[in-house]
Image (cartoon, helix red, strand yellow):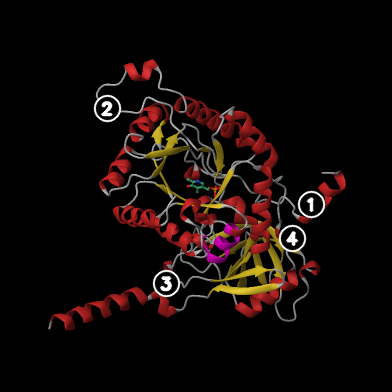
Amino acid sequence: MTDVDGVASAQANPTTRRLDDWDTARLTALADTYETPLYVQDLDRVRQNCARLRSAFPDADVRYAVKAHTGRAVLETVREAGLDAECASAGEVDRALTAGFPGDHIHYTAVNPPARDLDRVVEIAAEASGMTITLGAVDTLDRLTERGYDGRVCLRVNPGVGAGHHAKVRTGAAPKFGVPYDRAERVAREAATRVDVVGIHAHAGSGIDADGLEDHRSLVSRMGSLARSLTAPASDELVGGAVDDEFVTDALALEYVDVGGGFGVPYRADEPPLDLDAVAEATRDALGSLPGVDLAVEPGRYVVADAGLLLTRVNTVKPTASEVVVGVDAGMTDLLRPAMYDAYHPIRLLGGATGAPEPADRASTSVTVAGPICETGDVFCRDRQIERPIRGDVLAVGITGAYGYEMASQYNSRPRPAEVALAGGDARLVRRRERHADLTRVERDTAADADGETEGSR
Ligand SMILES: *Cc1c(COP(=O)(O)O)cnc(C)c1O
């Protein structure tokens, strides 16, 4: 690629999209048309993120961790871009099927899976051939084989290395996840007597950045060593240490080593974007030589985060001794990340209040942006310097495409917000705003079912 092409493609597909890159007039028009709070997800940007991942990892299997955003339009876009689906529950597997992923492009990672999830996933595996189940405990293997499953299994390993932007998302060293590293070879070889062991897997956590690269490297290198042990005959030491368990002593035919996701996204304007090529190079380097075994990665956030934002309208502006409290119509039930992880999201004043000056013509001030929920934690930011908002203005909360709508709830009996998907010049409502009737639907259905039963037994 010549320099000129390099520059052109960097312009066509920048490594990150900042909140300031969105068109103000278009966003305020969307807020007017669809009302607020409103999630906006740009499918073109999702496509660009997929393309950058595919080009940084040309030989790897790239699997989208769908829990970051399970909307059907996003899943279809990701599928068309050539990524597989990494699912964390049976519900996500069903969503992936509905979005058209074939079985052999679906990976289900079971963490203490409820019986109902296993029932459903075994049922799906019988129809959608080629699906892989990743498990991190021998109990899960037993529960699968009790259900007659003898298909493709990947072993989740606890590499003893964690990474991530917050303790709540560091999974690599948490005992909850995966089989302990020093037991993994035994467990994999035992499992191979009962199912088809096709891969090994580890996920360090979320938010790998330049600082977390060393952790990523050590995780990958441990996984490379384990894969080399498994793809060779069992060592004398391992065989000698066997008590009465049966296990496969021949080399296992692993298809892949999955080193997880967690690629970070710069939420702050002054944070540099993740150097994906450097991550890819470090990954290949640390993995070492593994002939015939593919590398797999599972980014979630990276695929969707900067493709989305949340629009919310200012309904209250209250000066206090310390700051201006700006009340908005979105809260922690719409976007949980600030309350849950102390996460930073950029916030931009778009304006739009009738008769108000343009944001650029206003003085800036220190604000707390607060939602409508009766919880102290229901604030999107504190002490943030922005142009002074006026009642009726629209604010954009940036980089909410990952774990945004996905973590929304109806707490405080708040209907979940609407979502529009952008593609080319078009906007399409993909999730209508919930109504009050949606809040009571399950109870009404339950009452109706009970009435039906009473009638039926009469
Ligand atoms: C959540 C998750 C991912 C994706 O994490 P991101 O930080 O969104 O990239 C990948 N793999 C597994 C097993 C996960 O649970």
Location of the C terminus (image quadrant): bottom left
Q: In which quarter of the image is residue 371?
A: bottom right
**3 and 1 marks in contact (CB < 8 Å):** no
Mark before the other along the chain sequence, 4 or 2: 4
Dot 1 corresponds to which residue?
9
User: Mark 3 highlights which residue?
Assistant: 413
Residue type beneath disc 3: Ser
Is tag 3's residue or tag 1's residue first in the polypeptide sequence?
1
For the record, the magenta segment spans: 70-79
- At mark 2, the secondary structure is loop
Q: Residue 209: in sight, yes or no?
A: yes
> Can you identify the residue that label 4 sits on?
20
Could you tell me how far apart the alpha carbons at marks 3 and 1 are, in whole angstroms? 46 Å
Q: Residue at x 75, y 60 (%)?
A: 21
* Label pair 3/2, CB-CB below 8 angstroms: no
Q: Quadrant of the N terminus?
A: top right
In the image, residue 122 above or below residue 40: above
Q: Mark 3 or 4 closer to N-term?
A: 4
Judging by the rendered image, the residue that carries numbered circle 2 is 245
Crowd tier of the residue under label 2, counting other residues whose Cα lies within 10 Å: few below 14, some 14–19, many 20 or above = few
| Image spot of residue 95 (x, y percent) | 46, 62
Front disc: 4 or 2: 2
